[in-house]
Every structure is written in C-alpha cells, then in structure tokens.
Image: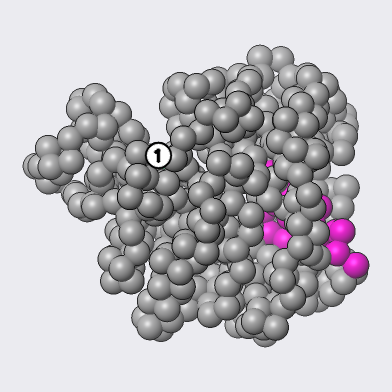
Amino acid sequence: MRVLLIGSGGREHALAIGLAADPAVEQLIAAPGNPGIAQFAELREVTATDPASVAALAVEVGADLVVVGPEAPLVAGVADAVRAKGIACFGPSGAAATLEGSKTFAKDVMSAAGVPTARAFTCSTTEEVAAALDEFGTPYVVKDDGLAAGKGVVVTDDRDVALAHAAECGRVVIEEYLPGPEVSLFVVTDGEAALPLLPAQDFKRVGDGDAGPNTGGMGAYTPLPWAPSGLVDQVMAEVVHPTLAEMRGRGTPFSGLLYVGLAITGQGPRVIEFNARFGDPETQVVLAMLTTPLGGLLRAAAIGELAAHPPLTWRDGSAVTVVVASEGYPEAPRTGGVLTGAERPGVIHSGTARRADGALVSSGGRVVCATATGADLPAARSAAYALVDGIELAGSHHRADIALAAVEGRVRV
Ligand code: AMP
C-alpha cells in the first residue's frame, strides 16, 4: 500500500519509522515531513491545515491510506476531504475531532456518557471566572477552550496568574484539580471496535521535579510499572466505550486515535483531557514497543475493519524518550542553531531543518527526542540518556529526571 503521512514533528517521525517497517507499506510519502522523516519517506510540500490541498496530494500520489498526525488538520476537516476522494484516512472527521478542538464540547460528551472527569465550568466573563475559581479553590486549573498546542493550560496557586490566563484566552474551562500521577492511554478505533496501546507517562513541565511552565512534553516512558492492575480494562469500560457510543449516537462517530489523558486519583482514573491524535512525545515510546505492523493496524481502523484485526503484540522491556529543547523553550525558543549527533538511530526529529549548505539546524522549541528501548526501565533510561549525551546544540536543555521516579519506585497512586 502507498501511505501519505501528514505532519512534520517527532510524532510523525515515530509514525514514519513504524510505517516504513511494515512490509505491507510499499511506499511512504510524507508532507511536509522533516529531515529525520526523509530517511524513510519521499517528502512533499503541503499546507497541512488545508483540506483541499491534502486531498489533492493524496490523489496525486495515488495514496491508499492517509495518516494525519497533528490535531490542527483534523479539526480543519482534512480527514473528511480525503475520504470524499474515496481514499482511506486514519484520523477523525472534523466534527469528531471537536473532542480535542473544544474542551467545552469534550466536557459535554463526557457528561452525557457518564465518563469520570473533573467538575468544570465554561467561563467567558471576569465574573464567571472569579466565581469558578472560588468554587474550586487552589490549585486553580484554567484551560483555553480551543486548540493551544498543549500549552493552553495553567495550573497555579496564584489567583492573579489564573485570572490573567483566563483574560488572555477569552473563553476558558475552569475545573477542579485532579491529584495523582498522570497516564496517557492511546486507543486505536474505527468508531466501534477499539484497541488500547500501552499506557505511557509524559512530562509536561519544563524542569526537573516538574518545575516551571507547561510545555508540549519533555519526555515519556512506557509501560508504567506502577499502574494499578486492570487500569486499561477499566478505562476502556468506563471511558473509551461510553465515549465512542456517545459520539456514534450524535451522528459523529470518532475513528482514528483517541488519546485519553488521565489522572489516577484516590477515587480511580479521571479524564483530564481527550485528544484526537497520537500524543507527542508518548508516541515515540509506545511505537518503539509495538511489534504489530503499524500500516495494517491504522488501515484496519481507517476502513472500519478493526474488529477483525489480530491482537496487538509488543516487545519485552521498556522504552524511554528524552526531549532535547532549544535555548529559551518554551517561552522564546531560539532556532537556527547547528545540531550534531542527531542523525543516529533512536534520535527522533521534532524541530529540525536542513540548511542550504546541508547542515542540520534547530527549527522549533522541541528539537529532537532521544528514544531507546531496553530490557527494563533502568536500561531503557540509560540508553536514552546515552543518546542525549551524543547530541550537541548550543544552549539546549533537557530534563534529567525522565522516568526516574518510576525507576526508583517513587510514583504513588
Ligand atoms: P491538558 O492540555 O488538558 O492535558 O493539560 C495540560 C496539563 O495540565 C496536564 O497534563 C496536567 O498536568 C495539567 N492539568 C490539566 N487539567 C488538570 C486537572 N483538572 N487537575 C490537575 N492537573 C491538570
């Protein structure tokens, strides 16, 4: 099959590695792609958020399957435009992607489906914001209602910071704080059948010990040695299937990748958020563990035949990824720095570009993800940090404690 992959980040590089390794994938085309993806795919230009352009490219390259990585094209309706050309597409319709595109919509679906989540209010005025902050108390959780590339959420004890974020965003969702370790569970679905991938944990804050502002994600690992037994089955039963049924009932079935972000509280798992696509950087570790051919899996979901797909298979051990970020990330990332040591197996490219003279340079806040597997979590962690040690980029930074609490048995549910 000929596969067209849309996107240009670390998630798409990880997807490209998985797709290229599937013997059923004869040709992989990526648009716009990045220098890491270029090792596995022919790159084409496209405006990923323009449904007509993506659909036209899919026709031009003779794609049998289009895989859409990022959320913005999905919310813009890229999957609808591709399907309208009679081409299979992995990714939800624009209507179904509203599960990620609007936090208010997601809360409404969860409430209708009886999914356990934080109590929340949608607020547009200063008075509503103030009342909601008082209702829930500290820590305050204030979320931009729309898409914000993982950076629209502020969790703070400082009321002025909470008020300022709300004022900046316009419409916000304010909700109760959910204590407990976080889990990202990715579920491949055709709208009805659903296959969970391995649960992973990511690290949202920029600094060690979860200090500093939220980022798009600074690292991840899988599986979770501390996860309660039965967690995945419980989330499938209490969250995923009711949500999929609710979406079908609304006439907007959700197919593609349902990302369930959870807090494991003393009362059980609670949904923090839904996303409509693979998460970055958890995809890097989850796909590093998957031994089931990726193209076949995504195609089965795209064409509504997931129920007939064989059970997923996984390698033994663990995977860890550590993000190397640009100087100044997340506030004001510096780009254009020359990067060395990044063209090695396991180094996944998130924000790199090829300069006219051939040099590899940084082009985003998160530059590369050093990704490794190992026989166990300590081994995978050591291997990932060994890769980090070989990467040079002036002023770059990374967290030194990815997966450390799990290795040391300090994650408490
Ligand atoms: P989101 O974009 O909704 O995933 O939020 C980003 C991050 O903010 C999450 O990964 C959590 O660390 C934190 N967060 C969001 N909502 C809550 C909540 N209700 N309680 C505690 N932490 C939260």
User: In this image, 375 relative to 335: left or right?
Assistant: right
Is residue 356 rendered magenta in the image?
no
Name which residue lies at 61% across and 42% down: 225
Residue in front for this viewpoint, 155 or 124: 155
Image coordinates of residue 292 in percent, x first then y, are 79, 64
Residue in front for this viewpoint, 28 or 51: 28
Q: Amino acid at mark 1?
A: Gly
Name which residue lies at 49% across and 29% down: 205
User: In this image, 334 relative to 248: left or right?
Assistant: right
Range shown magenta: 5-23
Q: Which quadrant does the C terminus fall into?
A: top left
Is 83 situated above or below 110? below
The quarter of the displayed image where residue 346 is located:
top right
Residue in front for this viewpoint, 297 or 197: 197
Is residue 284 shown to the viewer in this render? yes
Looking at the image, which residue sits at the far top? 395
Image coordinates of residue 340 in percent, x first then y, are 83, 23
> How packed is label 1: few (under 14 Cα within 10 Å), some, or many (20 or more)?
some
In the rendered image, which residue does mark 1 sit on?
180
The quarter of the displayed image where residue 256 is located:
bottom right
Name which residue lies at 54% across and 53% down: 229
Is 192 situated above or below 22? below
Is residue 12 rendered magenta in the image?
yes
